[in-house]
Amino acid sequence: MKLVILDRDGVINQDSANFIKSPNEWIAIPGSLDAMALLNQSGFRIAVATNQSGVSRGLFDMATLNNIHEKMQRELAQVGARVDAIFYCPHAADDHCSCRKPKPGMIEEIGKRFSVELNKVPAVGDALRDLQAYAKAGCQPILVRTGKGELTLAESNQPEKALPENTWVCADLSEAVQRIVAEYA
């Protein structure tokens, strides 16, 4: 089975410093849904791995998070695409859980759920914490320049903010998917 792991905010949909707190605030990045359709058409299953600390902060509840994800799935279905599983960490950073990226717990759980070895599974994110979690789990980290991606790339010359070794850098999810399909299909 071929699997791709995607972060949500800043990769699939527009990000917000104030969190995506309702379905109305979830707006797909142009081209991202079509890119995901291409993944599906190329035989890839898609897992989303997203930190959602807004739940523990009381900014939105689980029903709202589910409604946001239902909107994402509906919009994907309109272009013939789907996400096979959505994994999220509802905890705040000071909860010290093992599932919040940059820790690899959520990514490792995806590997277990899909019964795949994570080495070389392509994983796309826009923030350093995404890439760190992917690399720790053995995935191929891919940085997109959407969302926080430009800032992540700009800060990567600082030793403490360096990108994991062999990170691919792509303009957006569309470009990342083109490379994934070319390398893995």
Image (cartoon, rainbow, N blue to C red):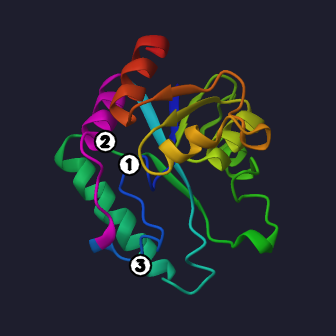
Q: Which percent across, then down, holds residue 33? A: 28, 43
Which label was assigned to residue 32?
2
Q: Which percent across, then down, holds residue 185? A: 43, 14
Q: Quadrant of residue 53?
A: bottom right
Q: Which percent across, then down, holds residue 128? A: 64, 45
- Compute the Cα span from label 1 to label 2: 5 Å
Q: Quadrant of residue 140?
A: top right
Q: Are marks 2 and 3 in contact (CB under 8 Å)?
A: no
Residue carrying label 3:
64
Amino acid type of disc 1? Ile
Q: Is residue 9 above or below residue 115?
A: below
Q: Is residue 3 above or below residue 75?
A: above
Disc 2 residue crowd, few under 14, some 14–19, many 20+, Cα 10 Å? some
Q: Are marks 1 and 2 in contact (CB under 8 Å)?
A: yes
The answer to if 82 sits in the magenta stretch is no
Amino acid type of disc 2? Ser
Residue carrying label 1:
12
The earlier-in-sequence mark between 1 and 3 is 1
In the drawing, does residue 129 fall left or right of residue 19? right
Q: Secondary structure at mark 1?
A: loop
- Which label sits in the foreground, 2 or 3? 2
- Compute the Cα span from label 2 to label 3: 22 Å
The one nearer the camera, 168 or 113, is: 168
The earlier-in-sequence mark between 2 and 3 is 2
- Compute the Cα span from label 1 to label 3: 18 Å
The one nearer the camera, 81 or 18, is: 18
- Most common secondary structure along the magenta stretch: helix
Say if residue 115 shows up in the picture: yes
Which label was assigned to residue 115?
none
The magenta segment: 25-42
The residue under the point 71% across, 31% down is 164
